[in-house]
């Protein structure tokens, strides 16, 4: 099974979003390594089969600060899944506009898949997700929209030529199958 690198997008020591991801990876029979976002420059990212960028409780306010730590994502060719803050930072690096408090969601919401993709194997076309964001992002030119909701247009996107996915919602809470499918893509 693949080795997944989990990069904590939250401030150092805050692992609330990483721990459920680690558990899902372990239950899927795979292994993971955890690092803080500031360690990206000192880590050989190519040693891993895929990378998951966690959310952050301060996700809406960190984009400009964190972006410099994630510049590598534009040249990385292996699978990446960015969640919430990882979605915002990735979008920002590719030219997204940050929609400050225009599409806030907190709690449980329904998303709808608008394109088929292996990331969605064994998931219904509409499903409930956990949301925790005040800001959202526009769809960058290099990406295609995969999922949307009535409240937030860009729920999940994929780069047009790379296995780079980002999700506004938190699949580590209700949608473990999405993370298991990502692990399969890393194999």
Image (cartoon, grey):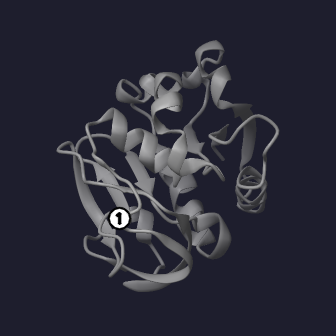
The quadrant holding residue 76 is top left
Residue 35 can be seen in this image: yes
The quadrant holding residue 13 is top right
Instruction: Please give the name of the residue rendered at 52% of the width and 29% of the height, measured from the top-left corner.
Output: 65
Q: Where is residue 26 in the image (x, y as percent from the top left)?
A: 78, 55
Q: Position of residue 147 (x, y in %)?
A: 33, 70
Q: Position of residue 132 (x, y in %)?
A: 58, 66
Q: Between 158 and 58, which is closer to the camera in this rendering?
A: 58
The quadrant holding residue 179 is bottom right
* In the rendered image, the vertical position of residue 23 relative to residue 9, given as above or below: below
Q: Mark 1 points at which residue?
A: 102
Q: Between 122 and 113, which is closer to the camera in this rendering?
A: 113
- Residue 36 in the figure: left or right of residue 165: right
Instruction: Please give the name of the residue rendered at 49% of the width and 82% of the height, measured from the top-left corner.
Output: 109
Disc 1 packing (10 Å; few <14; some 14–19; many ≥20) = few
Q: Between 98 and 36, which is closer to the camera in this rendering?
A: 98
- Residue 83 in the figure: left or right of residue 117: right
- Residue 55 in the figure: left or right of residue 142: right
Marker count (numbered):
1
Residue 124 can be seen in this image: no
Q: Position of residue 36 (x, y in %)?
A: 71, 31
SS under mark 1: loop
């Amino acid at each position: 099974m693949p080795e997944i690198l989990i990069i904590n997008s939250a401030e150092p020591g805050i692992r609330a979003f990483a721990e459920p991801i680690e558990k899902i990876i372990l239950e899927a029979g795979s292994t993971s390594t955890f690092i803080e976002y500031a360690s990206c420059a000192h880590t050989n990212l190519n040693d891993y089969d895929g990378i998951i960028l966690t959310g952050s409780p301060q996700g809406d306010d960190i984009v400009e600060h964190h972006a410099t730590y994630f510049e590598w994502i534009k040249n990385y060719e292996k699978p990446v899944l960015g969640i919430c803050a990882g979605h915002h930072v990735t979008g920002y690096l590719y030219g997204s506009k940050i929609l400050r408090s225009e599409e806030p969601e907190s709690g449980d919401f329904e998303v709808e898949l608008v394109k088929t993709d292996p990331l969605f194997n064994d998931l219904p076309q509409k499903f409930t997700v956990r949301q925790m964001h005040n800001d959202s992002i526009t769809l960058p030119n290099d990406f295609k929209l995969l999922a949307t909701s009535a409240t937030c247009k860009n729920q999940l996107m994929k780069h047009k030529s790379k296995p780079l996915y980002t999700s506004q919602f938190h699949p580590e809470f209700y949608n473990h199958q999405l993370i298991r499918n990502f692990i399969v893509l890393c194999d």
